[in-house]
Amino acid sequence: MASIAHELAKKQKEISVSEFFEKNKHILGFDSLTRALITAVKESVDNSLDACEDAGILPEVFVRVKKERNNEYNVVVEDNGPGIVKKQVPNVFGRLLYGSRFHARAQRRGQQGIGVSAVVMYAQITTGKPAKIRSKISDDDVAHQCELVMDTKKNRAQSTKEDFVIWDKEHGTRLEVNLKGKYVQGRQSIFEYLKGVAIVNPHARLTFVPPDGGTIVFERSTEDMPPPTKEVRPHPEGVELGELLTMAKYTEAKKMTSFLNTEFSRISLRVAREVLDHADVPHDQKPSRLTLDQAGAIVDAVHRVRIMAPETDCLSPIGEGLIRKSLKNVLGDLKASFYAPPITREPKVFAGNPFVVEVGIVYGGQLNKEESVQILRFANRVPLMYQQGACATTQAIENVDWRRYGLEQRGGKGIPFGPAIILVHVASTKIPFTSESKEAVANVPEIREEIELALKACARRLKTHLNKAERKSKTRVKFDIVQDIIPMIAQKSAKIVGKPVPDIAGTITKIMNVVWVEDGVTFDKKKHHVSVKLYNYTPKSQRLHVHMVLPYDGVVGKSLSLEPAEVRNGGKVTWDVKRIASTEVFELSFDMKGLDKDEYDENELYVSGIDPASVIGADVLPGDWDLEHVKITEEKPAEADEGAENGEVDYDEGAEVIEDEE
Amino acid sequence: MASIAHELAKKQKEISVSEFFEKNKHILGFDSLTRALITAVKESVDNSLDACEDAGILPEVFVRVKKERNNEYNVVVEDNGPGIVKKQVPNVFGRLLYGSRFHARAQRRGQQGIGVSAVVMYAQITTGKPAKIRSKISDDDVAHQCELVMDTKKNRAQSTKEDFVIWDKEHGTRLEVNLKGKYVQGRQSIFEYLKGVAIVNPHARLTFVPPDGGTIVFERSTEDMPPPTKEVRPHPEGVELGELLTMAKYTEAKKMTSFLNTEFSRISLRVAREVLDHADVPHDQKPSRLTLDQAGAIVDAVHRVRIMAPETDCLSPIGEGLIRKSLKNVLGDLKASFYAPPITREPKVFAGNPFVVEVGIVYGGQLNKEESVQILRFANRVPLMYQQGACATTQAIENVDWRRYGLEQRGGKGIPFGPAIILVHVASTKIPFTSESKEAVANVPEIREEIELALKACARRLKTHLNKAERKSKTRVKFDIVQDIIPMIAQKSAKIVGKPVPDIAGTITKIMNVVWVEDGVTFDKKKHHVSVKLYNYTPKSQRLHVHMVLPYDGVVGKSLSLEPAEVRNGGKVTWDVKRIASTEVFELSFDMKGLDKDEYDENELYVSGIDPASVIGADVLPGDWDLEHVKITEEKPAEADEGAENGEVDYDEGAEVIEDEE
């Protein structure tokens, strides 16, 4: 037995990180030939986009995939980024767990220091050929280029065949590798990946030259860079006890007060003292002396002292306007019948990392009713192509009861069926991926719950749209009949009894008994014109509140046909329409400017203060609209109304006549 | 701009593997408090089971989880393994990417050198408390114990508070950690994990003391260790070009012939020479001199030269008998109505790694008809609890059209619905997990396809069972009516016309016109008695072939009521039943010994040489049964038969009488 324990001991040895990943390439996304090729492009492009944004450059990325021989492809990815200084090339491209973004708390695509080096390694493992790198930084006149040979046992790369070349580019980087792979088209393909990149990076211009020839260009839909994101220090509420001890051990701060103040965000010296007092730790104690109990006390204290929420200027969501715009831009050929106004939630925090969730839904058009909905997943503006089932995004979608929002779903669980595409984007200073291949967001409760809330909010907007469409078409039928038949009857009967044709407006209202809402948006001369017509087809005069969600800053004050009673944050606007006499119509209208055509093309419209059953064309105000100033009086008996009286009289006569006739 | 390139350069730095995983704990399976606790137990238990099996010890593993305070738990895992020599403890438990199993090509639970050290790290990060380790190797009289403090910046652990203690164990190891977690019950829980371990490790004895008190023991259902698995060298067919170059660079072999012969499995010196000749590489060339082109030529040559398939004695599947046995053992309380005979496929290879797939299906009983089927996933005898959606196992299940096998499934895709549990076990010298948390098998095409084949084979057995059940119950109704009614009519009408009651057997057969198969298995005095009764309820005499899948070695020759016409490998047995006269019954029966009761309790029964539509109780022989000697003659006109003639005559009389009566 002893022998065994000792034998085993002999076998124990260290594993180099590159050895580990050489043997576990599938963890990095190289589990099949098809995926390997996509992963190689993905990691390289993500790298290029990060580099450009770090330098505030509008990205121009060029991708070329060429078939060398059976199962061997040549991949080139070229960008207009700042370039990489010569001596760093072997580290950036030839060394795993090495990079600039791992230690930074900021929203980046790459955060692990693995991605692009993994591509170089995989290429070398499968074809034995070194990667070719060319890079130019703007204060050099020429580009330097080299070939990298990786030693996976040591996790180091050697730069060979170094040279300087003329490059007609001010600055940029070019990676060229030969690797074993398989080029395919369809749902999981390089094309679909680049399409996804275009959707969530409207500021990037992408060019793709596929193996089968031709050139595909994804033009940018905006010239504005996303606002630059700041780096942040960890927020104290997220810190684990053990981490705190380690930080205290390695800090340069001399005293606990300065330690807390300098290492964490949102901890002023004042707050630091407050925390230390709660934890009963001396202000000027040396951080390295921090004991386990003291650390525990500080972690507890942090939750008792009031500390500001983390900064959020470290995040760069895409924004509701741009999501809708680029969805249309890229998915236009689907002719979808409805683009639900996207949702961008307020930033939240997990383990000290701020994050924000965005959701958009596309419905109808040429999308297949019989299949399960398509899911577009994004993290820090990167499309996620694989491991959908492992992703918190998918789990959130499966948790929502979509039957309540007009989609099919067995037992109210699982991925729903219907003609829809659901887009989810998670942006954070730290995306918790389930693996180094960065294809699925880990099931962190805080994140999953945020996604569910965003999905529900967006789904409500979809439902509103579907309701409206359905109820309108139904009532429309009844309405048309009434409007055709009644007048005919009136005329005919009038003729028979030799009386003048009666005014039958009242009769129609009596039969219809609805308030009909027609709303629309037109775009002309850089202006959106919004019109909401309220037809009172009831025998009584009506009063009601109209509510809309608008980019209200854009509204041209003088164009308003009626001043809002209230304007809330998030552009929640409420009008008080005091009186529409029976059979009359009231038009609420105004212009908006400063928006692109696509940014506003459907009104989110609600009514209140009236029996919702009697309104066609607008939904009742959702409960989550907590109005401040306007008091909503629920539907009250309306005062008598002459028009209606007349109507009734005529109606009775008409009725008699009809009877006579039979 | 230059400044940026240089600025970025300054930020570039190395990341230690432990830093990486400290920041990415979710990759290791610590993404939520609930999962963290399960992962901690899982990694420790897997480690214990591997240690025991390495040493050929029947595993006794003790697990205790105790609540310390809100969200802090104390976890103890103790085994009777060989123990760990003192100086290796800090490496085994306190260092990531360090271990004995990474470089070995053998079927083990742990293969990464991360798992248990990750537990120690997570515990320290979240509670700041060091892990306590105690270990005893059999040639020491006392156990040594210590506390480990990890330095995550350096990925090294320091052993503190070392001591020797008396331990009433011959040998073993005990790990104790305090960590942040949440204890839950239900589908994803420590209990369910241990239950899974018991199912696929029938030789292990597990004891669990949960926080809420009590003690749960999973007894072993066999005393036999799984056969020890050998280590193997890589199979040449899986080697990548770049890997070959690296191996050639580091080999100790002096010549190419000995290099190929010593570094790869299945390459004799003769084969080595043959390969080198094909590749046009000198036999005695120094491996270190191998060029890229030569390496490429060798890789190609390997596929042209005939090389034996990889050894498979490096694998330890559970086996069809044991899977069924332990499924019943552990899931017995479900009272399932049917345990489909499990399938263990022949070993296959991916990237030079042998692997084998096993599948079992449990059906009916108290399982819910309305929910989607439960999936039990296992890899190298470890239950997989999370990331079901990312697993090749799940994808294989989703790819099968289960509607053909009696389960509900929308559009023939996705996870089916029905009262079933599907068990899938993948065993390999190298399981390609999607991440270090080892919860999902990567979607490697070779593996996924094998799983699909196994699922279909097992599903066919389920379908056979469901068919039998359904058709029998339907026909039974008809049968009962006929058997009750006809005689009554016969008697009544005979009385009326004053004739003797006719023999109506023929009438019944005419109406039924089926061959009724009743088969059963009984167990008594260590023997299985199998009986297959063939009732010929047709007006003609019948000839047919009966086919069964049996552990034929167990069959007692002299007990056979009819000698088989053919016995094939895999226990495929065929009988030729030459003649069963109309209205008569033939019984085929025999005894089997040497099997446990649970190992055989349902016959897999097929017929051929007869119109399947006229057989109730047995399915027609599947096409994949390629019989050798027996010639199957499809249903042929049977010779006239007296019994039948009489029947017809009586029947006609009866019919007349009935008419008279109206």
Image (spheres, coloured by chain):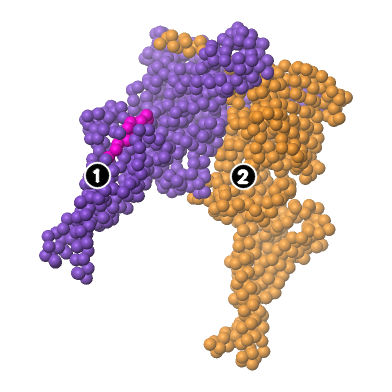
Chain colours: A purple, B orange
Query: Where does residue A559 sit, x and y in percent of width and height?
Result: 22, 31
What residue type is disc 1 on? Ile
* Magenta-highlighted residues: A566-577
In this rendering, would A300 be left or right of B586?
Answer: left
Q: Residue A567 colored magenta? A: yes
Kindly tell me whether residue A277 is visible in this rendering: yes
Circle 1 — which element? strand
Query: Where does residue A388 sit, x and y in percent of width and height?
Result: 51, 36
Query: Where does residue B158 sit, x and y in percent of width and height?
Result: 72, 16
What residue type is disc 2 on? Ile
Kindly tell me whether residue A28 is visible in this rendering: no
* Vertical order, B436 against A497 (above or below): above
Q: Chain of mark 2?
A: B
Q: CA distance from mark 2 to mark 1?
A: 62 Å
Residue displayed at 19% across by 59% down:
A650
Q: Which mark is residue A28?
A: none
The residue under label 2 is: B375
Residue displayed at 34% across by 27% down:
A221
> Are discs 2 and 1 located on one and the same chain?
no
Where, quadrant-wise, is the N terminus of chain B in this rendering?
Answer: top left
Residue in the foreground of this view, choosing between A105 and B275 = A105
Secondary structure of the magenta portion, mostly? strand
